[in-house]
Amino acid sequence: MPLKFLSSGESHGPELNIILDGIPANMPLLAEDINIDLKRRQGGYGRGGRMKIEKDKAIFTGGVRHGRAFGGAPVSIKIINKDHQKWLYAMSPEPVDESLPEVKEQLDAKFISKVRPGHADLAGAIKYNAPDVRDILERSSARETTSRVVAGAVCKKFLSLFGIEVFSHVLRVGEVSLSDEAAKLREELSYEDFKAKVEASELRICDSTDTEEQMKEYINRVRKNGDTVGGIVEVFAKGVPVGLGSHVQWDRRLDGIIAQALMSVHTVKSVEFGIGQGAGMHLGSIVQDQIFSDKEKAEQELRYSRKTNNLGGIEGGMSNGEPIICKVGVKPIPTLVSTLESVDLATKENSQSHFERSDVCVVPAAGVVLEAMLAFAIAKEFLNKFGGDSMEEITRNYQAYQDYVKSK
Protein backbone atom coordinates (compact mmCIF):
# COMPACT_ATOMS: atom_id res chain seq x y z
CA MET A 1 0.00 0.00 0.00
CA PRO A 2 1.44 3.43 -0.94
CA LEU A 3 2.37 5.58 2.04
CA LYS A 4 0.27 8.74 2.30
CA PHE A 5 -1.02 11.17 4.88
CA LEU A 6 -3.84 13.65 5.21
CA SER A 7 -4.32 16.36 7.79
CA SER A 8 -7.22 18.55 8.85
CA GLY A 9 -7.80 21.32 11.33
CA GLU A 10 -7.21 25.05 11.54
CA SER A 11 -4.82 27.31 13.40
CA HIS A 12 -7.38 28.27 16.05
CA GLY A 13 -9.79 25.37 15.64
CA PRO A 14 -10.34 22.72 18.33
CA GLU A 15 -7.63 20.33 17.14
CA LEU A 16 -5.41 19.08 14.35
CA ASN A 17 -6.01 15.61 12.94
CA ILE A 18 -3.54 13.47 11.02
CA ILE A 19 -4.15 10.15 9.27
CA LEU A 20 -1.07 8.27 8.07
CA ASP A 21 -1.94 5.32 5.85
CA GLY A 22 0.49 2.60 4.79
CA ILE A 23 2.52 2.15 7.98
CA PRO A 24 3.37 -1.56 8.21
CA ALA A 25 1.98 -3.77 10.93
CA ASN A 26 4.10 -4.40 14.01
CA MET A 27 6.17 -1.23 13.72
CA PRO A 28 6.97 -0.05 17.28
CA LEU A 29 5.50 3.39 17.90
CA LEU A 30 5.06 5.49 21.04
CA ALA A 31 3.69 8.99 21.51
CA GLU A 32 7.12 10.07 22.73
CA ASP A 33 8.58 9.22 19.30
CA ILE A 34 6.43 12.07 17.99
CA ASN A 35 6.48 14.43 20.98
CA ILE A 36 10.25 14.82 20.75
CA ASP A 37 9.96 16.45 17.33
CA LEU A 38 6.86 18.44 18.29
CA LYS A 39 8.90 20.04 21.06
CA ARG A 40 11.82 20.67 18.68
CA ARG A 41 9.46 22.41 16.23
CA GLN A 42 8.30 24.82 18.93
CA GLY A 43 11.83 25.83 19.89
CA GLY A 44 14.37 28.15 18.33
CA TYR A 45 15.37 31.76 18.84
CA GLY A 46 12.93 34.25 17.32
CA ARG A 47 9.68 32.37 17.88
CA GLY A 48 6.46 34.19 18.80
CA GLY A 49 3.84 34.07 21.56
CA ARG A 50 1.92 31.07 20.18
CA MET A 51 4.77 28.78 21.21
CA LYS A 52 4.22 29.81 24.85
CA ILE A 53 0.56 28.81 24.64
CA GLU A 54 0.69 25.45 22.89
CA LYS A 55 2.52 22.46 24.38
CA ASP A 56 1.83 20.02 21.59
CA LYS A 57 1.36 16.37 22.49
CA ALA A 58 0.40 13.52 20.18
CA ILE A 59 -2.76 11.60 21.06
CA PHE A 60 -3.29 8.32 19.18
CA THR A 61 -6.89 7.81 18.09
CA GLY A 62 -6.42 4.72 15.93
CA GLY A 63 -3.98 2.26 14.40
CA VAL A 64 -1.71 1.81 17.44
CA ARG A 65 -2.11 -0.90 20.06
CA HIS A 66 0.23 -1.71 22.94
CA GLY A 67 3.03 0.43 21.50
CA ARG A 68 2.92 -0.83 17.92
CA ALA A 69 1.09 -0.19 14.67
CA PHE A 70 -1.20 -3.14 14.08
CA GLY A 71 -3.15 -4.91 11.37
CA GLY A 72 -2.22 -2.48 8.61
CA ALA A 73 -4.71 0.04 10.01
CA PRO A 74 -4.23 3.76 9.32
CA VAL A 75 -2.46 5.52 12.18
CA SER A 76 -4.58 8.46 13.32
CA ILE A 77 -3.32 11.15 15.68
CA LYS A 78 -4.74 14.38 17.06
CA ILE A 79 -3.17 17.50 18.56
CA ILE A 80 -5.27 19.73 20.82
CA ASN A 81 -5.16 23.48 20.13
CA LYS A 82 -5.21 25.06 23.60
CA ASP A 83 -5.62 28.53 22.11
CA HIS A 84 -9.02 27.50 20.75
CA GLN A 85 -10.60 28.41 24.08
CA LYS A 86 -10.16 32.08 23.17
CA TRP A 87 -11.80 31.53 19.75
CA LEU A 88 -14.95 29.59 20.66
CA TYR A 89 -17.31 31.88 18.78
CA ALA A 90 -15.03 32.90 15.91
CA MET A 91 -14.14 29.27 15.12
CA SER A 92 -17.32 27.51 16.22
CA PRO A 93 -18.35 24.62 13.92
CA GLU A 94 -21.99 25.39 14.80
CA PRO A 95 -23.86 28.56 13.75
CA VAL A 96 -23.57 31.33 16.35
CA ASP A 97 -26.09 33.95 17.50
CA GLU A 98 -24.62 37.28 16.32
CA SER A 99 -27.24 39.21 18.30
CA LEU A 100 -25.39 38.33 21.49
CA PRO A 101 -22.90 41.11 22.36
CA GLU A 102 -20.05 38.77 23.35
CA VAL A 103 -20.44 36.80 20.11
CA LYS A 104 -20.59 39.91 17.91
CA GLU A 105 -17.57 41.40 19.66
CA GLN A 106 -15.40 38.34 19.01
CA LEU A 107 -16.57 37.94 15.41
CA ASP A 108 -15.78 41.59 14.65
CA ALA A 109 -12.39 41.35 16.33
CA LYS A 110 -11.41 38.28 14.32
CA PHE A 111 -12.80 39.40 10.94
CA ILE A 112 -10.12 40.08 8.30
CA SER A 113 -10.40 41.89 4.99
CA LYS A 114 -6.89 43.39 4.78
CA VAL A 115 -4.68 40.85 3.03
CA ARG A 116 -1.01 40.16 3.73
CA PRO A 117 1.56 40.11 0.89
CA GLY A 118 3.47 36.83 0.79
CA HIS A 119 0.62 34.85 2.33
CA ALA A 120 -2.28 32.85 0.86
CA ASP A 121 -4.75 35.63 1.77
CA LEU A 122 -5.47 37.33 -1.57
CA ALA A 123 -5.27 34.37 -3.93
CA GLY A 124 -7.18 32.16 -1.48
CA ALA A 125 -9.94 34.72 -0.83
CA ILE A 126 -10.52 35.10 -4.57
CA LYS A 127 -10.26 31.37 -5.34
CA TYR A 128 -12.63 30.28 -2.56
CA ASN A 129 -14.93 33.34 -2.59
CA ALA A 130 -14.16 34.18 1.04
CA PRO A 131 -15.35 37.65 2.15
CA ASP A 132 -13.69 36.97 5.53
CA VAL A 133 -10.02 36.24 4.86
CA ARG A 134 -9.92 34.25 8.09
CA ASP A 135 -11.49 31.42 6.05
CA ILE A 136 -8.13 31.25 4.24
CA LEU A 137 -5.73 32.25 7.00
CA GLU A 138 -6.84 29.53 9.40
CA ARG A 139 -5.92 26.62 7.15
CA SER A 140 -2.98 28.25 5.35
CA SER A 141 -1.34 29.14 8.67
CA ALA A 142 2.01 27.52 9.45
CA ARG A 143 0.22 25.84 12.36
CA GLU A 144 -0.43 23.15 9.73
CA THR A 145 3.25 22.22 9.82
CA THR A 146 2.57 20.65 13.22
CA SER A 147 0.69 17.92 11.34
CA ARG A 148 3.64 17.40 9.00
CA VAL A 149 5.98 16.99 11.95
CA VAL A 150 3.65 14.33 13.37
CA ALA A 151 3.59 12.35 10.11
CA GLY A 152 7.31 12.85 9.59
CA ALA A 153 8.18 11.70 13.11
CA VAL A 154 6.43 8.39 12.45
CA CYS A 155 8.38 8.06 9.19
CA LYS A 156 11.65 8.90 10.97
CA LYS A 157 10.90 6.14 13.48
CA PHE A 158 10.31 3.70 10.62
CA LEU A 159 13.50 4.68 8.79
CA SER A 160 15.59 4.47 11.96
CA LEU A 161 14.77 0.76 12.17
CA PHE A 162 16.77 0.36 8.95
CA GLY A 163 19.67 2.57 9.99
CA ILE A 164 18.49 5.67 8.11
CA GLU A 165 18.71 8.99 9.95
CA VAL A 166 17.28 12.36 8.92
CA PHE A 167 18.57 15.59 10.43
CA SER A 168 18.95 19.31 9.74
CA HIS A 169 20.96 22.32 10.79
CA VAL A 170 20.94 26.04 10.01
CA LEU A 171 23.53 27.48 7.64
CA ARG A 172 22.40 31.09 7.56
CA VAL A 173 19.99 33.56 9.18
CA GLY A 174 19.52 36.69 7.11
CA GLU A 175 22.87 38.42 6.72
CA VAL A 176 24.70 36.14 9.15
CA SER A 177 26.11 32.81 7.95
CA LEU A 178 28.26 30.15 9.55
CA SER A 179 31.94 30.96 9.98
CA ASP A 180 34.75 29.33 8.00
CA GLU A 181 35.51 27.34 11.13
CA ALA A 182 32.10 25.63 11.04
CA ALA A 183 32.95 23.31 8.14
CA LYS A 184 36.21 22.25 9.82
CA LEU A 185 34.39 21.62 13.09
CA ARG A 186 31.80 19.41 11.42
CA GLU A 187 34.53 17.33 9.77
CA GLU A 188 36.22 16.81 13.13
CA LEU A 189 33.11 15.86 15.10
CA SER A 190 31.42 12.49 15.10
CA TYR A 191 27.85 12.49 13.83
CA GLU A 192 26.49 12.12 17.37
CA ASP A 193 28.60 15.01 18.65
CA PHE A 194 27.51 17.12 15.69
CA LYS A 195 23.85 16.41 16.44
CA ALA A 196 24.32 17.20 20.10
CA LYS A 197 25.95 20.54 19.33
CA VAL A 198 23.15 21.50 16.92
CA GLU A 199 20.41 20.52 19.38
CA ALA A 200 22.08 22.50 22.16
CA SER A 201 22.00 25.65 20.03
CA GLU A 202 18.90 27.90 20.01
CA LEU A 203 19.65 28.64 16.35
CA ARG A 204 20.36 24.95 15.61
CA ILE A 205 23.86 25.67 14.30
CA CYS A 206 27.19 23.88 14.63
CA ASP A 207 29.90 26.53 14.94
CA SER A 208 32.81 27.04 17.29
CA THR A 209 32.84 30.85 17.07
CA ASP A 210 30.42 33.56 18.29
CA THR A 211 28.16 33.10 15.25
CA GLU A 212 25.16 32.22 17.40
CA GLU A 213 25.42 35.49 19.32
CA GLN A 214 25.75 37.38 16.06
CA MET A 215 22.60 35.71 14.77
CA LYS A 216 20.70 36.51 17.96
CA GLU A 217 21.78 40.16 17.85
CA TYR A 218 20.69 40.32 14.21
CA ILE A 219 17.28 38.80 15.02
CA ASN A 220 16.87 41.27 17.89
CA ARG A 221 17.51 44.20 15.54
CA VAL A 222 15.01 42.80 13.06
CA ARG A 223 12.41 42.38 15.83
CA LYS A 224 12.97 45.96 17.03
CA ASN A 225 12.31 47.20 13.50
CA GLY A 226 9.05 45.25 13.31
CA ASP A 227 10.41 43.04 10.55
CA THR A 228 11.03 39.31 9.95
CA VAL A 229 13.98 37.31 8.62
CA GLY A 230 14.58 34.07 6.73
CA GLY A 231 17.64 31.94 6.10
CA ILE A 232 19.09 28.71 4.74
CA VAL A 233 18.74 25.22 6.20
CA GLU A 234 20.60 22.05 5.28
CA VAL A 235 18.56 18.88 5.67
CA PHE A 236 20.03 15.47 4.97
CA ALA A 237 19.49 11.73 5.23
CA LYS A 238 22.31 9.27 5.91
CA GLY A 239 22.17 5.50 5.53
CA VAL A 240 19.84 5.60 2.51
CA PRO A 241 20.33 2.44 0.39
CA VAL A 242 21.23 2.51 -3.28
CA GLY A 243 18.32 2.44 -5.70
CA LEU A 244 15.41 4.41 -4.24
CA GLY A 245 13.57 6.23 -7.02
CA SER A 246 14.00 5.52 -10.72
CA HIS A 247 15.23 7.01 -13.98
CA VAL A 248 12.43 5.32 -15.92
CA GLN A 249 9.68 7.96 -15.63
CA TRP A 250 9.83 11.65 -14.71
CA ASP A 251 7.53 11.31 -11.71
CA ARG A 252 9.57 8.47 -10.20
CA ARG A 253 12.83 10.43 -9.95
CA LEU A 254 13.84 10.69 -6.30
CA ASP A 255 15.18 14.24 -6.50
CA GLY A 256 11.89 15.41 -8.02
CA ILE A 257 9.90 13.62 -5.31
CA ILE A 258 12.01 15.12 -2.52
CA ALA A 259 12.02 18.60 -4.07
CA GLN A 260 8.21 18.62 -4.24
CA ALA A 261 7.94 17.52 -0.61
CA LEU A 262 10.35 20.20 0.62
CA MET A 263 8.94 22.95 -1.62
CA SER A 264 5.47 22.29 -0.19
CA VAL A 265 6.55 23.69 3.20
CA HIS A 266 5.04 27.14 3.74
CA THR A 267 8.16 29.32 3.90
CA VAL A 268 10.34 27.46 1.38
CA LYS A 269 11.36 29.26 -1.82
CA SER A 270 14.29 27.17 -3.07
CA VAL A 271 15.66 23.62 -2.87
CA GLU A 272 19.16 22.58 -3.96
CA PHE A 273 20.80 19.16 -3.95
CA GLY A 274 24.48 18.87 -3.09
CA ILE A 275 26.33 21.93 -4.37
CA GLY A 276 23.13 23.11 -6.06
CA GLN A 277 23.73 26.21 -8.19
CA GLY A 278 27.44 25.51 -7.96
CA ALA A 279 26.93 22.66 -10.41
CA GLY A 280 26.39 25.29 -13.10
CA MET A 281 29.56 27.18 -12.22
CA HIS A 282 32.20 24.45 -12.51
CA LEU A 283 33.46 21.99 -15.11
CA GLY A 284 32.11 18.45 -15.26
CA SER A 285 35.44 17.02 -14.15
CA ILE A 286 34.99 18.91 -10.87
CA VAL A 287 31.24 18.48 -10.34
CA GLN A 288 30.86 14.74 -10.96
CA ASP A 289 31.38 12.49 -7.93
CA GLN A 290 34.02 10.10 -9.22
CA ILE A 291 33.78 6.46 -8.18
CA PHE A 292 36.47 4.26 -6.64
CA SER A 293 36.58 0.62 -5.63
CA ASP A 294 37.24 0.51 -1.90
CA LYS A 295 38.42 -2.89 -0.67
CA GLU A 296 38.01 -1.81 2.93
CA LYS A 297 34.27 -1.44 2.34
CA ALA A 298 33.86 -4.86 0.72
CA GLU A 299 31.93 -6.23 3.71
CA GLN A 300 29.63 -3.20 3.98
CA GLU A 301 26.55 -2.29 1.96
CA LEU A 302 28.43 -1.08 -1.12
CA ARG A 303 32.08 -1.61 -1.97
CA TYR A 304 32.40 1.64 -3.95
CA SER A 305 33.36 5.06 -2.56
CA ARG A 306 33.22 8.72 -3.56
CA LYS A 307 35.67 11.43 -2.58
CA THR A 308 32.97 14.06 -3.06
CA ASN A 309 29.18 14.27 -2.81
CA ASN A 310 28.56 17.28 -5.03
CA LEU A 311 25.33 15.82 -6.41
CA GLY A 312 23.84 15.29 -2.96
CA GLY A 313 23.47 11.51 -3.03
CA ILE A 314 21.25 11.28 -6.12
CA GLU A 315 22.25 10.34 -9.69
CA GLY A 316 19.82 9.65 -12.53
CA GLY A 317 16.87 10.15 -10.19
CA MET A 318 18.06 7.38 -7.84
CA SER A 319 19.84 7.29 -4.48
CA ASN A 320 23.48 6.26 -4.95
CA GLY A 321 24.39 5.30 -1.38
CA GLU A 322 25.87 8.66 -0.38
CA PRO A 323 24.03 10.92 2.07
CA ILE A 324 21.15 12.82 0.49
CA ILE A 325 21.87 16.51 1.11
CA CYS A 326 19.56 19.45 0.40
CA LYS A 327 20.00 23.16 1.00
CA VAL A 328 16.69 24.94 1.44
CA GLY A 329 15.97 28.67 1.22
CA VAL A 330 13.42 29.82 3.81
CA LYS A 331 11.73 33.19 3.27
CA PRO A 332 10.86 35.64 6.07
CA ILE A 333 7.42 35.17 7.65
CA PRO A 334 4.93 37.40 5.75
CA THR A 335 3.18 38.74 8.87
CA LEU A 336 5.09 41.85 9.97
CA VAL A 337 4.47 44.04 13.00
CA SER A 338 5.41 47.04 10.87
CA THR A 339 2.82 45.93 8.23
CA LEU A 340 3.12 46.25 4.45
CA GLU A 341 1.30 48.10 1.68
CA SER A 342 -1.74 46.10 0.65
CA VAL A 343 -5.49 46.33 -0.03
CA ASP A 344 -8.74 45.97 1.90
CA LEU A 345 -11.03 43.53 0.09
CA ALA A 346 -14.10 44.97 1.82
CA THR A 347 -13.53 48.58 0.73
CA LYS A 348 -11.43 47.81 -2.39
CA GLU A 349 -9.09 50.58 -1.21
CA ASN A 350 -5.36 50.63 -0.54
CA SER A 351 -4.56 49.75 3.04
CA GLN A 352 -1.93 48.46 5.42
CA SER A 353 -1.76 44.67 5.69
CA HIS A 354 -3.39 42.81 8.55
CA PHE A 355 -1.20 41.80 11.51
CA GLU A 356 -1.75 38.43 13.12
CA ARG A 357 0.46 37.22 15.97
CA SER A 358 3.72 36.15 14.36
CA ASP A 359 7.29 34.98 14.72
CA VAL A 360 10.37 36.98 13.78
CA CYS A 361 12.51 34.01 12.69
CA VAL A 362 11.36 30.43 12.08
CA VAL A 363 14.51 29.16 10.39
CA PRO A 364 15.53 26.72 13.19
CA ALA A 365 11.98 25.37 13.44
CA ALA A 366 11.72 25.12 9.65
CA GLY A 367 14.55 22.59 9.78
CA VAL A 368 12.41 20.26 11.91
CA VAL A 369 9.53 20.53 9.43
CA LEU A 370 11.91 19.89 6.52
CA GLU A 371 13.21 16.79 8.28
CA ALA A 372 9.63 15.56 8.48
CA MET A 373 8.98 16.05 4.77
CA LEU A 374 12.30 14.51 3.73
CA ALA A 375 11.61 11.53 5.99
CA PHE A 376 8.14 11.10 4.48
CA ALA A 377 9.47 11.21 0.90
CA ILE A 378 12.24 8.70 1.63
CA ALA A 379 9.96 6.39 3.65
CA LYS A 380 7.45 6.40 0.81
CA GLU A 381 10.07 5.39 -1.75
CA PHE A 382 11.60 2.87 0.67
CA LEU A 383 8.22 1.17 1.03
CA ASN A 384 7.69 1.28 -2.73
CA LYS A 385 10.88 -0.74 -3.15
CA PHE A 386 10.82 -3.05 -0.15
CA GLY A 387 7.11 -3.00 0.58
CA GLY A 388 5.21 -5.58 2.54
CA ASP A 389 2.34 -5.72 4.98
CA SER A 390 4.40 -6.21 8.13
CA MET A 391 7.76 -5.12 9.50
CA GLU A 392 8.89 -8.72 9.36
CA GLU A 393 8.16 -8.99 5.63
CA ILE A 394 9.77 -5.63 4.81
CA THR A 395 12.87 -6.52 6.85
CA ARG A 396 13.27 -9.77 4.90
CA ASN A 397 12.93 -7.93 1.59
CA TYR A 398 15.40 -5.25 2.64
CA GLN A 399 17.98 -7.73 3.92
CA ALA A 400 17.80 -9.79 0.74
CA TYR A 401 18.43 -6.66 -1.31
CA GLN A 402 21.36 -5.64 0.91
CA ASP A 403 22.89 -9.08 0.45
CA TYR A 404 22.54 -8.62 -3.31
CA VAL A 405 24.11 -5.14 -3.19
CA LYS A 406 27.15 -6.47 -1.34
CA SER A 407 27.78 -8.86 -4.23
CA LYS A 408 27.93 -6.14 -6.89
Image (cartoon, rainbow, N blue to C red):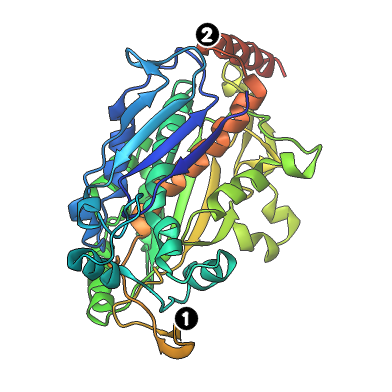
Work out whether 233 lies above or below 146: below
Tag on residue 392? 2
Work out whether 375 lies above or below 331: above
Residue position for label 1:
345
Tag on residue 401? none
Q: Nearer the viewer, mark 1 or mark 2?
A: 1
x then y, percent, for residue 162: 49, 21
**Residue drawn at (55%, 25%) of the image:** 22
| Left or right relative to 161: residue 292 | right
| Left or right relative to 390: residue 302 | right
Tell which circle, 1 or 2, labels the residue nearer the N-terminal end: 1
Work out whether 211 lies above or below 365: below
Callout 2 amino acid? Glu
**Residue drawn at (20%, 51%) of the image:** 85
Badge 1 local density, few (<14 within 10 Å), some, or many (20+)? many
x then y, percent, for residue 344: 44, 83
**Residue drawn at (44%, 37%) of the image:** 152
Whole-Å distance between the Cαs marked 1 and 2? 57 Å
The residue lying toward the viewer, choosing from 92 and 340, is 92
x then y, percent, for residue 274: 58, 51
x then y, percent, for residue 278: 62, 62
**Residue drawn at (38%, 37%) of the image:** 191
